[in-house]
Image (cartoon, rainbow, N blue to C red):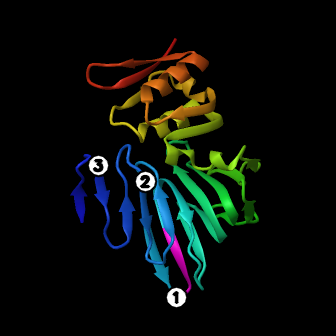
Amino acid sequence: MLTLSAAGVWILQSRNTYATGIAETRQITLPDGTRVHLDAQTSLHYEATGSGRTVHLRHGAAVFQVAPHPTPFKVAADTWSVRDIGTTFQVLLRHDAPHGTVEVGVAEGEVELTSERHPATPPVRLSAGEETTWEDGSDRPSDKTQTASPGDFATWRDGRLRYRNRPLSQVLADLQRHQKDRLVLLDPELGRLTVTGTLSTRDLKQAYTALEQILPLRFAVQGSGEVQVLRR
């Protein structure tokens, strides 16, 4: 069933499929009792069999607080699989990178990350406070990093996006999920610049200003509502 909410965002909820619209975050409870917090423009599908529970993350980001159950729980995100070992964790799937990217962070407990495209790579175990990124073009994920504090986990739930040396192209893709106006990067070279800091999704003008202060660029709003990102 497809319906349009009063806020003007599309919500799909049919046979254990859930999705959020632009600038919408949402909390749901899966049939097994697992609590999930979906970021803007996120879609996932849940299925359970006698051998286990699987969430298929199609795009976007979600935090999983996994309910105890006799069968294992995992998140399948494109070619990657994240197996729960009693935990609260986040999975973010990006399609904007040339090869696709998954980002995984753990707040409590542990997870194991694998890639079916690289079966020879041993499972990567992440513990509480650790996060990593795995690009599909690489045979292994980046080195694990430690979050500065528990408050830095999945900050989008509080209207903040936190970055550490992230390409501007990924930052703009994240901001795009939180606004209707189309962001257009006119100079692809700018997309390779890196961003470190925290941006607001509840005050996008403030986010633009912050980026203009640290990078040689400017945001120009067009009459059509399109927002162009130009070199300054």
For the point 70% across and 46% down, which residue is it? Answer: 149
Task: Name the residue that disc number 2 marks.
Answer: 42
Q: Amino acid at mark 2?
A: Thr
Query: Nearest the camera: 199 or 229?
Result: 199
- Three-letter code, disc 3: Val
Neighbor class of circle 2 (other Cα within 10 Å; few <14, some 14-19, many 20+) is: many
Image coordinates of residue 5 in percent, x first then y, are 24, 53
Q: Can residue 215 be seen from the camera position used here?
A: no
Residue drawn at (63%, 35%) of the image: 166
Q: Note whether 169 is above or below 46 in the view shown.
A: above
Between 35 and 142, the residue placed more toward the observer is 35
Q: Earlier in the sequence, mark 3 or mark 2?
A: 3
Residue assigned mark 3: 9
Position of residue 211 in the picture relative to residue 175 (left or right): right
The secondary structure that dominates the magenta segment is strand
Judging by the rendered image, the residue that carries numbered circle 1 is: 50
Q: Earlier in the sequence, mark 1 or mark 2?
A: 2
Q: Amino acid at mark 1?
A: Gly
Q: Which mark is residue 77?
A: none
SS state under label 2: loop
Q: Looking at the rendering, which quadrant does residue 228 occupy?
A: top left
Q: CA distance from mark 3 to mark 1?
A: 35 Å
Q: Position of residue 41 (x, y in %)?
A: 40, 49
Give the CA distance from mark 1 to mark 2.
27 Å
Q: What's the magenta region?
A: 50-55
Percent of width and height locating residue 195 = 62, 29
